[in-house]
Image (tube, helix red, strand yellow):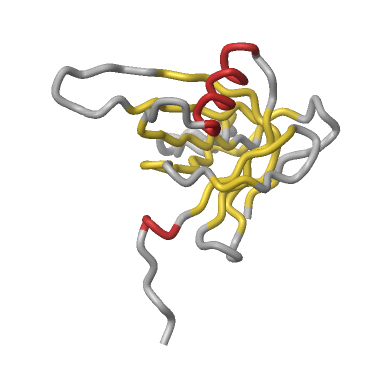
């Protein structure tokens, strides 16, 4: 029987852009990979006897990995990711369903960072990945 998996088993790694990500981001709290392809409308009029049915076709493949980390003082991974986001430097990102398992995303990304500070919650830092091939590596999804 196939094993049912939990979200806690998802793994995210980072590394130097242009190479494969190897360092596990251990303090990640949320990891999401959203395929957000864009579409163009391809509806045709038909013979005019009925309302046309709207149809679309993809015109651009897109993916947007996001992840959050709980801030910890002097933690090297958080510091490196914040520095990359602030400097506009790409990093390698790899998201796996389970360690050693199916790749959900593998590629280089520029990072966008958000750091809300609610009074009653933890200090989480959210990152949005913007895939790029600027470092000679095309991104892939599993």
Q: Residue at x 67, y 30 (%)?
A: 91
Q: Residue at x 64, y 23 (%)?
A: 110
Q: Is residue 36 left or right of residue 9?
A: right
Any part of residue 45 in sight: no
The answer to which image quadrant residue 83 occupies is: top right
* Percent x, y of residue 72: 38, 30
Q: Is residue 55 left or right of residue 115?
A: right
Between residue 27 and residue 61, name the one nearer to us.
Answer: 27
Quadrant for the C terminus in the image:
bottom right
Above or below — where is 15 with respect to 79?
below
Q: Residue at x 61, y 56 (%)?
A: 103
Between residue 44 and residue 35, name the one nearer to us.
Answer: 35
Q: Residue at x 37, y 18 (%)?
A: 115
Q: Is residue 41 left or right of residue 54?
A: right
Quadrant for the N terminus in the image:
bottom left
The answer to which image quadrant residue 29 occupies is: top left
* Percent x, y of residue 6: 35, 62
Any part of residue 97 in sight: yes
Above or below — where is 2 with respect to 17?
below
Between residue 18 and residue 62, name the one nearer to us.
Answer: 18
């Amino acid at each position: 029987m196939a094993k049912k998996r939990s979200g806690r088993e998802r793994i995210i790694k980072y590394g130097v852009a242009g190479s494969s990500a190897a360092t596990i981001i251990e303090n990640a709290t949320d990891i999401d990979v959203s395929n957000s392809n864009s579409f163009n409308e391809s509806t045709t009029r038909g013979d005019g006897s009925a309302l046309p049915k709207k149809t679309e076709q993809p015109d651009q493949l897109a993916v947007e990995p996001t992840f959050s980390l709980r801030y910890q003082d002097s933690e090297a991974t958080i510091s490196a990711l914040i520095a990359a986001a602030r400097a506009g430097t790409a990093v390698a990102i790899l998201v796996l369903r389970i360690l050693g398992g199916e790749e959900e995303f593998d590629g280089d990304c520029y990072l966008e960072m958000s750091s809300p500070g609610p009074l009653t919650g933890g200090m989480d830092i959210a990152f949005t990945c913007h895939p790029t091939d600027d470092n000679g590596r095309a991104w892939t999804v599993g």
